[in-house]
Image (cartoon, grey):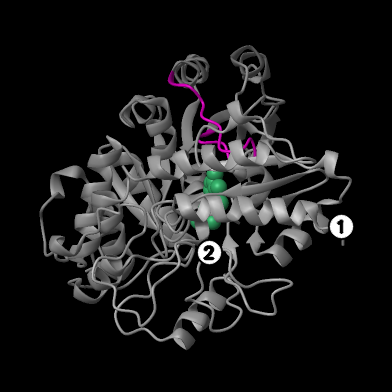
Amino acid sequence: MPSSSCRSRGAAELGGGGSPSSAAHDPGGGGGIPGAASTAPRPPHAPSNHDHSETTSRMRERGAFMGLLWHGPACHGAPGEGGSGTGRPMIPINLRSDTQTLPTPQMLEAIAAAPLGDDTYDEDPTVARFEALAAERLGMEAALLVLSGHMGNLVAMMAHAQPGDEVLLDRDSHIYYYEVGSLASVAGLMPWPLRSEAGRIDPDELRSAIRARDLHYPRPALLCLENTHNRAGGRVVPPSLHRELCRVAREAGLRVHLDGARIFNAAIAAGVPVSEYTREVDSVMLCLTKGLSCPLGSVLAGSRDFIARADRVRRRLGGGMRQAGVIAAPGIVALEGMIDRLADDHRHARRLAAGIAALLGLEVDESSVETNMVYVDHRGSGLSTDALLARLHAAGVIASGRPPHQIRLVTNRHHDEATIDEALARIARAMQDPT
Ligand SMILES: Cc1ncc(COP(=O)(O)O)c(C=O)c1O
């Protein structure tokens, strides 16, 4: 019988149930494909999951699906070949987001090999194994697989707070800025937006924003934090500030949820175990689909009691799943083998930032590049954000816009040093091009 109320989803389940072959796990060193057997050498900037006998047309089809914009049979040009002016097609270097990552071959194998069952009956052994592993890796009692980061944040807020309660959060946080207002429209919560500087909320500002409990006010119930901070450019909230913010919230009787879509990036950059962050909060959401490269899914972690409540909320939102092991299996690969390599993305982002900083018309604060994101100020170029993006696209680099005067570039496992250097060469060409 369905048994969400009695499911523990905890670290104690680790090792229970069947599992995809661990021999298939990818240590994830920079996106190389051991044993790849494509007919032509793969340029370093090509997405790297097209191994074995995958054909060029299949690659193009998959690339187009992922927004990688394959432009013809150009997967065998050396870096720098082809592109505008040469009459030959070129494979764009996609620096739009770490969400553009494709699953590794090991993930695809793990999906195919995963033992499955009906998860709404607690009978999917791969989900059970994933949730136990996630709880352990995040240093929490229990975990719950959800479909997306947005869903994980929403489920957490609804499990922590009642309709009409107040949620304090950064006005530049993903939850407030990008999640379609679901905290108000779906959860019925009242946002109290705070300012931040480089993704950092001032503890004094938080303290004075928490209103006294009064019949006339909504009940302040929850503080939501974000780390790394997306709109602040992948900035890391240092552990000491994180602790202080949690302390202020707790003293006022608030619970704390951490949008840790990229919490392992934060922990790696701060040089601390992830538990340094998670032990201070009541819940944390981690995305599997960013630098960890899974095709789908996020995970919410917290106490057993919280996860039992979250499980009910997830179901209420239509997020109960059947053979969800197909999502959990690549999640296991990610948690076992993809975390440490996030440091490569950070190194590549710094290399990219240093190169861009040397170009006329573009400005980067290199000290702000702490993880995998590079925000570039293009005011000196005299171009609008859209005009610059179009120019970069024509030169073979895909970025995203942060109008009115910034663009964002994000590194991921599909980029190695040569890709970054090639991207820099293309960006330099684009900035020289008078058209
Ligand atoms: C900080 C942060 N939180 C949450 C999310 C939402 O994740 P998803 O796109 O899986 O809903 C994102 C997505 O980019 C994010 O950057």
Amino acid residing under circle 1: Pro
How busy is the neighbourhood of tag 2: few (under 14 within 10 Å), some, or many (20 plus)? some
Q: Is residue 51 visible?
A: yes
The secondary structure making up most of the magenta span is loop
Looking at the image, which residue is at 59% across and 54% down?
Answer: 423
The part of the chain drawn in magenta is 225-239
Q: Is residue 299 left or right of residue 244?
A: left
Is 288 inside the magenta-drawn segment? no
Location of the N terminus (image quadrant)? bottom left
How busy is the neighbourhood of tag 1: few (under 14 within 10 Å), some, or many (20 plus)? few
Q: Position of residue 432 (x, y in %)?
A: 79, 53
| Residue labelled 2 has its Cβ within 8 Å of some atom of ligand 1 | no
Q: Position of residue 109 (x, y in %)?
A: 24, 72
Can you tell which quarter of the image residue 314 is in?
bottom left
Q: Is residue 302 above or below residue 223?
A: below
Looking at the image, which residue is at 61% across and 40% down?
Answer: 355
Q: Which secondary structure, mark 2?
A: loop
Can you tell which quarter of the image residue 221 is in?
top right
Q: Is residue 324 visible?
A: no
Q: Position of residue 38 (x, y in %)?
A: 34, 79
Instruction: Pick whichever of labels 1 and 2 is earlier in the sequence.
Output: 2
* Count of picture labels: 2
Location of the C terminus (image quadrant)? bottom right
Q: Is residue 422 left or right of residue 116?
A: right
Q: Which secondary structure, mark 1?
A: loop
Report the residue marked by disc 1. Answer: 434
Q: Position of residue 431 (x, y in %)?
A: 77, 51
Q: Nearer the viewer, residue 355 or 192?
A: 355
Q: CA distance from mark 1 to mark 2?
A: 23 Å
Can you tell which quarter of the image residue 96 is in?
bottom right
Report the residue marked by disc 2. Answer: 79
Amino acid residing under circle 2: Pro
